[in-house]
Image: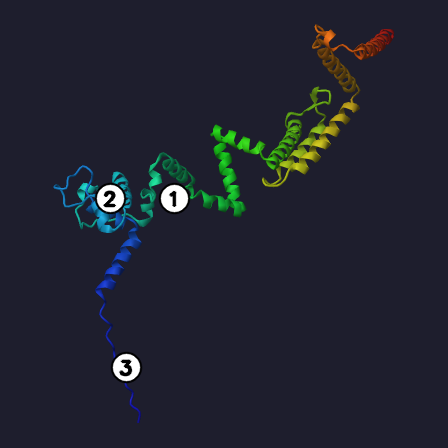
């Protein structure tokens, strides 16, 4: 016969007071985060206006010595509590006594008031913190990056997405920073590869602008410089090319597309001029006057006060040949006028 022996019930080991204390402190910190430490400072460090004989509290320096940390660290907690007290989240220092417990805000709120770096109190740090808040991130993150430019450089060099973010940030800042504009411009012109890239992009932008102007204004500029209304089919072609260009991704190279669109539109403009007899005549007339004005300006700028210093026989020969050419031109034009009169 086998006897069944019931297992003996063992009573749990008594809970260590030390473990219980750790658990309570852990829970308090999990719920309140930095507020728990802020409270220790707020109820133990006397405000600046109080003397040592007025309160059992100690100075921030004394508290730091007792805590084994720097007075700066203590003051960061002190200032965080002070800001929160001004907002009505926690009691002011004067209302707290050493060892006093109060209800604390949620842990997530702590980072709104606590700044882990002294640089945040400087003008530069304040500007960085404000920009971080505007971007919806914690100021401490932005300050950490600002204090480690070498790490920022490494991230930009190694990671394309970080480089793109840095580029966009620079573009946003450069619009309001003339000094940075000048510095970037100097960097570009001093770097051959960048200078070539800028020239290429500028050329593409000009070509896209040419197509856009036709599509949006409905006018074309002829090779001779006339501005006239674009034929309907030519404008439609410009609109088609423009829509293709606008559909390209922001990081996609527009150079090839811009060149094709620009070349097509230039050809169509020339064809439009040739297809319109009246416009073709006006185009030739405009070109003639343009050339004549340029030649006239060149001769008007010539001076002969010191001709004896630079005279050569060949100069006279070339001018005589030019005079003959001008005479022939005048004769041809007069003949054309006579033909018009007879017609």
| Residue placed most toward the observer, 152 or 251 | 152
Q: Residue furthest top?
A: 305
Q: Secondary structure beneath disc 3? A: loop
The location of residue 207, given as percent across then percent down, is 66, 31
Q: Quadrant of residue 120?
A: top left
| Residue placed most toward the observer, 145 or 13 | 145
Q: Quadrant of residue 237?
A: top right
Q: Quadrant of residue 220?
A: top right
Task: Identify the mark nearer the N-term, 2 or 3.
Answer: 3
Task: Identify the mark nearer the N-term, 1 or 2.
Answer: 2
Give the spatial CA distance, label 2 vs label 3: 54 Å
| Residue placed most toward the observer, 217 or 92 | 92
| Residue placed most toward the observer, 302 or 10 | 302
Task: Identify the mark nearer the N-term, 3 or 1.
Answer: 3
Give the spatial CA distance, label 3 vs label 1: 57 Å
The location of residue 238, given as percent across then percent down, is 68, 31
Left or right: 301 in relation to 127: right
Q: Is residue 343 visible?
A: no
Left or right: 182 in relation to 242: left
Q: Is residue 40 above or below residue 245?
A: below
Q: Which mark is residue 90?
A: 2
Pointer 1 residue:
138
């Amino acid at each position: 016969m086998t006897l069944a022996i019931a297992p003996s019930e063992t009573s749990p080991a008594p809970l260590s007071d030390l473990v219980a204390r750790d658990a309570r402190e852990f829970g308090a910190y999990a719920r309140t985060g930095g507020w728990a430490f802020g409270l220790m400072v707020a109820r133990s460090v006397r405000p600046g206006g109080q003397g040592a004989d007025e309160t059992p509290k100690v100075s921030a320096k004394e508290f730091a010595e007792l805590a084994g940390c720097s007075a700066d660290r203590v003051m960061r907690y002190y200032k965080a509590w002070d800001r929160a007290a001004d907002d009505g989240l926690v009691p002011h220092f004067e209302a707290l006594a050493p060892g006093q417990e109060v209800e604390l805000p949620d842990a997530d709120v702590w980072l709104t008031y606590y700044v882990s770096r002294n640089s945040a109190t400087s003008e530069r740090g304040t500007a960085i913190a404000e920009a971080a808040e505007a971007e919806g991130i914690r100021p401490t993150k932005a300050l950490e990056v600002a204090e480690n430019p070498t790490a920022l450089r490494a991230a930009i060099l190694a990671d394309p997405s970080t480089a793109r973010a840095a580029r966009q940030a620079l573009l946003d800042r450069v619009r309001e920073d003339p000094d940075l504009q000048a510095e970037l411009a100097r960097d570009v012109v001093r770097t051959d590869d960048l200078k070539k890239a800028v020239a290429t992009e500028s050329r593409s932008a000009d070509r896209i602008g040419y197509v856009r102007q036709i599509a949006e204004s409905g006018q074309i500029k002829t090779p001779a410089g006339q501005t006239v209304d674009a034929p309907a089919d030519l404008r439609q072609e410009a609109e088609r090319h423009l829509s293709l260009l606008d559909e390209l991704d922001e990081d996609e190279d527009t150079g090839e597309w811009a060149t094709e669109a620009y070349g097509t539109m230039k050809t169509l403009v020339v064809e439009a001029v040739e297809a319109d007899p009246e416009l073709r005549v006006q185009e030739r007339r405009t070109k003639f006057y343009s050339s004549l004005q340029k030649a006239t300006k060149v001769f008007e700028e010539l001076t002969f006060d010191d001709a004896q210093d630079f005279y050569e026989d060949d100069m006279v020969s070339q001018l005589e040949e030019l005079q003959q050419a001008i005479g022939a031109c005048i004769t041809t034009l007069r003949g054309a006028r006579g033909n018009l009169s007879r017609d």
